Image: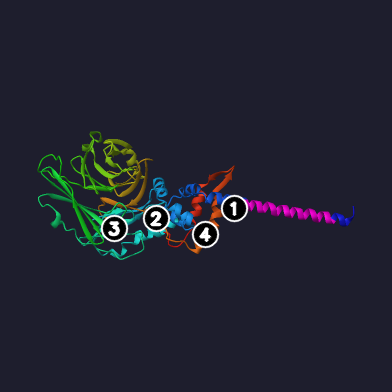
Amino acid sequence: MAVGELGDGAASEGMARLSLSATVTAMAATATATATSSVFDNDDLLREILVRVTLPHCLVRASLVCKSWLRNASDLVFLRRFRSLHPPPTLGFYIDSSVLSCPRFVALQGHPPELGVLLGRASRHFDAWSDVPLSMWDSRNGRVLVEIYGKLAVHSPLLPPADISVYPQTPLKVWLDRSFTYNLHEFLPEDGGNGREYYRLALGYKCKCMIAYLFHLVDGIWVGRASDTISFPGPDEQAEPVIPLGVHAFGKLFLLTNFSIIIVLDCKTLELTKVNITDEIELEDCDEVDLCEGKLEDEFTLVCLHPTKLQVWTHNLSQITWTLSHSVARDDILQASVTEAGESCAHVSILGIANAGKSAFLKLDDSIFLLDIVAKNMTKVYEICPEDGDIERIYPLLMIWPPKFPAHLTGLCTLVYLVHNQFLLERGMKILGGKCVLRTSDLSRALHSLSLEGTL
């Protein structure tokens, strides 16, 4: 064979290889595009990706990708599922005492770095009020209710600084039946409200009868309603109930009295009902009792600190049953406070309950611990200083829920979509025989990396 013929054959073979390589590349690109489309155009698969992101603000970042992502991330059914799997995290808590001029924020450890902006706002929020006598009454969904010179105001520590409105006093003298003796309670709406509203409850008692007046302040206007009078079996006609604790959840107010009875007020219908505390709880032997919301709509939780144990009881209003949910030996609690010298604390008290009775803030002598009641783990979160005074209550600060989604998309979001669409597909999934295997760590990292201005 001639040399020229060999050269022509080699050239033809090379061209064929290049053509084959280009064809394979094109087919691979087509397959990748098809796989991308099959995943990210499938709402069911997209929701399975989004639901594995743990923080609410990451949903906002994901919603900036495109309209489809916005529609899925903001879907109400999806948000309910997301919240059931990932309750809003507790960022920290405020401590308040008669000695402190204003509440002091303590951030919990272990939060991702991008939450530093929120933690910084919460920590600095009351700096400008350091010379003003200010006390805290309630904390809910990123907002706090505080008293300033005898008047109440709502603050939003997690939002950018804004003007604070001080609200008018409740017209109690006009509304209340003066033949009753009243316990007054102030609290925020369940969702924290819009920053311009709160409730005041006046619970009246006389001669074994009880009545409730509920006042709701909205945009500077008070609206008041009264319940029907119910019988309340006190030990005698002269004894008056003391109501130190109240919880607002699922449209109801749960109020713990000193008569082994819990009062339930439906905020919509203003129906008053009574729940007797079961004898199994042995309330007379409790050192302390605290109340918090339940996991379900018809439930509330009672946390009891006994001399030998801490118990969590759940009451179901529909089934009228008490159930022991969790129990932790007191010795296990005290073990966490043992010093290097082998000394343990002398006193334990409950400062607050969170996460539907699954977590408790406990004061052990001069330290505050966070107890995971389910896992039975204790973590020291704060060392009480002499200038803090006597701390009797803490106010947990949770991340705001639901997240606020954007009303429209920008050109930057399209770029983010093009870049991270491919990233999520290649790093977060493996297409195996038509099945998708999710790698949640990579998916979460991808969405956490979308550091877009204003999404916090």
Reading the chain from its start, which is encountered first: label 4 or label 3? 3
Magenta stretch containing residue 27, yes or no?
yes
Reading the chain from its start, which is encountered first: label 1 or label 4? 1
Reading the chain from its start, which is encountered first: label 2 or label 4? 2
Q: Residue at x 24, y 54 (%)?
A: 199
Tag 3 residue = 103
SS type, badge 3:
loop
Tag 2 residue = 403
Instruction: Judge the density around disc 4: few (<14), some (14-19), many (≥20) Cα neighbours within 10 Å.
Output: some
The percent coordinates of residue 65 (x first, y second) are 49, 57
Q: Measure the alpha-carbon separation of dots 3 and 1.
A: 54 Å
Tag 1 residue = 33
Under mark 2, the amino acid is: Pro
Under mark 3, the amino acid is: Pro
Under mark 1, the amino acid is: Ala
The percent coordinates of residue 180 (x first, y second) are 12, 49
Q: Up-down: is 321 above or below 339?
A: above
Label drawn at residue 416: 4
